[in-house]
Image: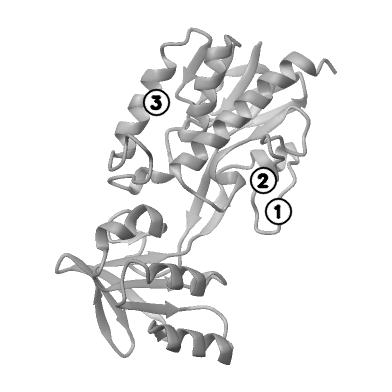
Amino acid sequence: MFEVAIIGGGVAGLSAALQLGRTRRKTLVLDGGSPRNRHVSHSHGWLTRDGASPAELGALARQDIAAYPAVHYQQDSLAQVTGHNNAWELLTHKGAHYQAKRLVLALGIRDELLPIPGLQERLGQEVQFCPYCHAYEWQDQPLGSVSKSPHALMKAALLQDWTQDLTLWYQGDQLTPQEREALSQSGIKLREESVQSVTPGEAGLWIQTETERVWVKGLFTDPVAIHQSELVAQLGCALSPDGFVVVDPFQATSVPGVFAAGDMTTPMHALSVASASGTLAASAAHRSLVFDKT
């Protein structure tokens, strides 16, 4: 039996594995091999690795945990989980069976984009989610945002720290007169017609609507976050109103013996945040093994 099973091999999961490896507790890592940032050529905002590719970061992380004999890394994903605290039964998609006393969920999320032709194909290139991760490289150039999210106006306001030439293609519900006035005063160009397609061109992206074709250097969008698997539902973890797994300050979920980390627990999606939450979850899981004998 493993003392901790980590479900997910991204930044959060491997950070948890590193911490647990140093405790010498027998730890299993199940890595399905589909990290959320696989579409991105470079990652930014993480000290000592600013600009590194996700593939490079993943390889370095797996190299780190390989130095710890207590950690058993498997390229596999969890299909089913049953049991309870101290006695979890795991079945993988490759048919392997494992047992574990504690679980750390680090499954990340899946991004559901607006159904705009070309948007998915350019994701990770001219189309991005996070201004903090990618807007700096496009500073002082024409940028766009396409969104139906209630947070669209907030993101547009943030983007003005990187450019004063910003167009918002808003695809959501009717804006209030106050919201329209705020956009007008800020200098953000509001477009409410449906975006028909996005296509690459001239070292940027062409945004096509019924009435115009606009070039931008980069385009930001707001995906809907969806859990990568049914495991959260199987376990019965409580969710927040916006769909994230509810955790306490030490990443414990509502289910005894189950901890969660990374993008599935917070709307603040950054490598450093995911890594920190993985470390917290691992430390809390270890402490529960030591002090919780129930």
Q: Residue at 49% across / 49% down in the picture?
A: 269
Q: Is residue 99 above or below residue 248?
A: above
Q: Residue at 54% across / 21% down in the picture?
A: 19
Q: Are marks 3 and 1 in contact (CB under 8 Å)?
A: no
Lower sequence index among marks 1 and 2? 1
Amino acid type, label 3: Ala
Lower sequence index among marks 3 and 1? 3
The secondary structure type at the circle numbered 1 is: loop
| Colour mapping | one colour
Q: Is residue 198 visible?
A: yes
Q: Which residue is mark 2?
A: 245
How far apart in space, not on screen, are marks 1 and 2 (Cα)? 6 Å
The secondary structure type at the circle numbered 3 is: helix
What crowding class fits label 1: few (fewer than 14 Cα within 10 Å), some (14-19), or many (20 or more)? Answer: few
Q: Is residue 183 above or below residue 150?
A: below
Q: Which residue is mark 3?
A: 61
Q: Is residue 106 visible?
A: no
Lower sequence index among marks 2 and 3? 3
Q: Are marks 1 and 2 in contact (CB under 8 Å)?
A: yes
